[in-house]
Image (spheres, grey):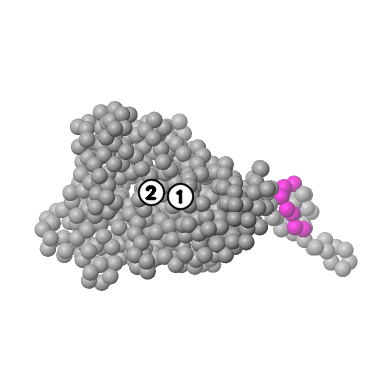
Amino acid sequence: MTTPNGVVESVVNVGTDLLADAVAEQAVPVTRVDWRPPMEHTEADLAIVAADPLRRSANERALDAMLKVTATLVDVVPASEALDLQPGQFLHAGPPITWDRASGPLRGALMGGAALEGLVDDPEKAAALFEAGTSVSLEPCHHRSAVGPMAGVVTPSMWMFVLEDPATGRRTYCSLNEGLGKVLRYGAYAPDVLHRLRWLGNVLGPLLQTAVRRVRDESGPVDVTGILTQMLQMGDEAHNRNRAGTLMLLRDLSPAMVTAGIDAGFSRSDVAESLRFIGGNDHFFLNLAMPACKLALDAARGVEGSTMVVAMARNGTDFGIQVAGTGDEWFTGPAQLADGLFLGEYGPDDANPDIGDSAITETAGIGGFAMATAPAIVRFVGGSVPDALATTRRMHEITLGENPRWSVPVLEFQGVPSGIDVTKVCRTGILPQINTGMAGRIAGVGQVGAGLVTPPAEIFPEALARLAQLTRSRA
């Protein structure tokens, strides 16, 4: 911009910073526009999808459907009841995979799950069971309206949170959170891991069922979406930081855990141990945040012409996405190694590529997309506070809108970026940011760290190509 006298007042720079830096050195104000060319070989497909007459209204409907959903905690039941899971059937995180391609932590979790179910007397003997594949089966959690953190292994005897959208009656499910470190979801299967899982099944699950049902029947079910709203105002981002959410859940359930629990015959020591376990497990609420996000995103599935991502999930080998306008099809690429902080003496060579269904939180606009709500998260996953703020701002460039229910105080209560748009990712080259834990690459190790990761870039052009193909078929 110049004055009538030809004096330069400011400069707008698009793309490379070389010119901007030179102008700034001359004390001229510079507005920097972060422009990038589209992803390679996507120009033709972007043009086709952009011309689709269904796209705009379809994306509006998909985003609106997601934002309308509220999630309530209505029950806690075994997976055999919630998901009709039969002996020998195992669920796992991420897109479909077979034993021969399974990563170390997924194999470890499956081996531990087989021992938990009594299919083998020693987890080490389970490998032969899965190699034969005659009496066991593997299926993604997402295919049964469920989600699982990290390896995400679910067996029939595991207890599941049951979330429901009161407006539609639709339900989603997730197992109970075991805590951090050497736990099944990180691929550990030592005797203490199995002992904890049996306690979850024999004590905590039934006690939570008693409390959740008492609260539901007397005052209405726990409003999980409401807790998410509050915890984002209190320093959580609902993926790798859930401290406020866990404490609010404990606030809502603890009176009923005591009164209804004692009435139902649970010992005082069982109630005390359960309260102590939840209170000391900052990640306990994650297993409610995840199915709440899935419940919202599933409402957008099947919207013809929509380019909105409805699932991001990893099995430790593959990273997959699903899109509203392409049905249940998975678009997959190699899972990436996270960049972050390691526990103890562990380092990058000890970590497995990214794993888990927990990226459903980012898909819904929280987690890595809401890092600005939780600047303290950088102490757990790496980076800096300015990085956290910049990440949330950057994610707005690849999303369809904002969620007014979930806002970011430090950004003037702007809604979190919501509705990842395949076309915007391909047009800008900006990839979704995910906060994640890191599992050891060798079965049995457990957690080795936490950090930041993005999907493999090629899966978005693959999804775009499929959208373009569907657009052409409708023309």
Label disc, if present, on residue 141 of the rendered structure: none
Q: Is residue 302 left or right of residue 398?
A: left
- Amino acid residing under circle 1: Asp
Q: Is residue 436 above or below residue 64?
A: above
Is residue 316 in view? Answer: yes
Mark 2 Cα-neighbour bin, 10 Å: few <14, some 14–19, many ≥20: some
Amino acid at pointer 2 = His
The image shows residue 219 at horizontal and vertical percentages of 25, 72
Check contact, mark 2 vs mark 1: CB within 8 A.
yes
- Place residue 344 in its image quadrant: top left
Question: Is residue 410 among what the camera can see?
Answer: no
Q: Which residues are magenta?
A: 11-18
Sooner in the amino-acid sequence: mark 2 or mark 1: 2
Percent x, y of residue 151 = 36, 41
Percent across and percent down for residue 257 are 20, 61
Closer to us: 368 or 102: 102
- Give the quadrant of the C terminus: bottom right
What residue did someone put label 2 on? Answer: 143
Q: Which quadrant is home to the N terminus?
A: bottom right
Is 198 drawn above or below residue 301 in the view shown?
A: above
Residue drawn 50% across and 59% down? 303
Depth check, front residue: 437 or 161: 161
Closer to the camera, 28 or 333?
333
Q: Is residue 13 magenta?
A: yes
- The residue tagged 1 is 328
Tag 2, which secondary structure? helix
Q: Position of residue 424 (x, y in %)?
A: 61, 54
| Alpha carbons under labels 2 and 1: distance apart | 9 Å
Residue shown at the point (68%, 48%) measured from the top left? 44
Residue at image x 24%, y 62%? 212
Q: Quadrant of residue 306?
A: bottom right
